[in-house]
Image (cartoon, grey):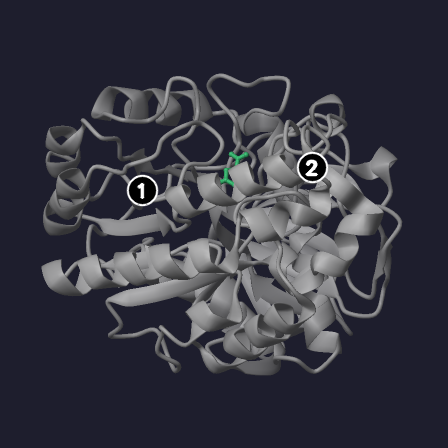
Amino acid sequence: MTQSNWLIKNATLVSDGRQWQADLRVRNGRIERIDADLDRRADETVLDAAGRHLLPGMIDDQVHFREPGFPAKGDIASESAAAVAGGITSFMDMPNTNPPTLDATALADKYQRAAGRAFGNFGFYMGASNDNLEAIKAIDPTTTPGVKVFMGASTGNMLVDDPQVLAGVFAHAPTVIITHCEDTPIINANMAAARARHGDAIPVTEHPLIRSREACIKSTRLALELARRHDAHLHVLHISTAEELDLFQAGPMAGKRITAETCVHFLHFSADDYARLGTLIQCNPAIKDATDRAALLAAVADGRIDILATDHAPHTREEKAQPYPAAPSGLPLVQYALVSALEHVHAGQFSLPTLVERICHAPAQRFGVLDRGWLREGLFADLVLVDLDSPTTVRSQDVLGRCGWSPFEGETFAASVVATWVNGHRAWYQGQVDPVPAGQRLQFSGVRG
Ligand code: DOR
């Protein structure tokens, strides 16, 4: 039963910094009414959600769904199905595909591919390269959430290291600029030194020393400097060190031109986990120390981190089975991201309304997503119902993403995702993804922040 008129009764709603008990009516794909004690209408399906929490669907502004170019790792259909199973109702996909998204034609091709196949709502970033500045200047800011700049080389070889081009992007991009910050010369020098010490048998425990904290800090400082010089809107992705956090301002996101993000794996794992999980948790930037993790958790709480996302980056088991550093960097995360983040709510590290701010409200606001991101009358009915006390054990046979594995396998999280609605369509319920893909193209206001 996936019809689009719903009456969700007795849930604890979480939105706009508060939690309250109410009923919520979904009609024609939108939230029609939020009130106490709504009566069922004849054409509505009722779901009694007593004891459960209803949140706006998570808006994940950082995923790699691998289409076009890498169908063995995933595609828009497979990865968005995993996303809705995890409570993610909208996603924004990165440009390091094949071909990379470097002009309006490649961008339009992605939107065309997603139409009718995506289980969640979709937006696609433009990428920057050393030679597409004119294409960046010409972007219509209502067609993309932003321009992604790899200020450090990572999967896909999209490094922008020409200082003049970087300055041009920061001066002229008509959208938010989002950056991957790691200094490639520092990383290359660290890698050469590790090879000198270990030959071809570099242990994976060296990864956070090669992709070092100094590399992150130097590159993030440069991005901030460029943003200030050119008065740009900058959003720095996947912050991984304690030191970088102090470069950002605490407090609410409204009014900030420079914002920061971290990802669920940096809040969950630490360098202590390389011994157990090896290349399965190898990603760029690298997962750092337990002290960094503690600092990141505090920054999610106080707002130096504005947005929490996934950086879902699937690679096959076979690829990951290669020894370091040949194994590719990246973790598949969308399906268990929300339940892993709720673990920190359980532990008292931040509140549930704060989590909803970081995963729903802030990404909607930052990228000017129209009509999504809050539980408010009139907005699209992108919803996730969670049970905070019904555990989820992560098992490989339940993984829906194409690569079929999760770095969380064997772990039990306290919460579970009971149901997910996308545009009023129940996309996930009782362990099943509904076969009808109900995702729509995200609409962007073109106004940043
Ligand atoms: O670990 C990563 N994987 N970091 C990136 O920057 C890219 C991503 C990927 O596409 O695999």
Q: Amino acid at mark 2?
A: His
Tell me, yes or no, if residue 208 can be seen here: yes
Tell which circle, 2 or 1, labels the residue nearer the N-terminal end. Answer: 1
Camera-side residue of 321 and 372: 321
Q: Amino acid at mark 1?
A: Val
Describe the element under mark 1 as helix, strand or loop: strand
Describe the element under mark 2 as helix, strand or loop: helix
Left or right: 241, with 385 as reference point: left
> For residue 50, which quarter of the picture?
bottom right
Cβ(mark 2) to ligand 1 < 8 Å?
no
> For residue 99, which quarter of the picture?
top left
Measuring from the top left, give residue 185's x and y in whole percent: 38, 42
Measuring from the top left, give residue 143's x and y in whole percent: 25, 38
Q: Determine contact: label 2, label 1, CB under 8 Å.
A: no
- Where is mark 2, residue-wise? 198
Q: Quadrant of the N terminus?
A: top right
User: Residue at coordinates 23% horizontally, 52% vertically from top-left?
Assistant: 445
Circle 1 crowding by C-alpha within 10 Å: few under 14, some 14–19, many from 20: many
User: Residue at coordinates 77% horizontally, 55% vertically from top-left?
Assistant: 273
Tell me, yes or no, if residue 32 can be seen here: no
Q: Is residue 185 above or below residue 46?
A: above
Circle 2 crowding by C-alpha within 10 Å: few under 14, some 14–19, many from 20: few
Cβ(mark 1) to ligand 1 < 8 Å?
no
- Where is mark 1, residue-wise? 149
Left or right: 310, with 371 as reference point: right
User: Residue at coordinates 39% horizontally, 82% vertically from top-left?
Assistant: 251
Q: Which mark is residue 253?
A: none
Q: Is residue 36 above or below residue 397?
A: below
Q: Is residue 345 above or below residue 176?
A: below
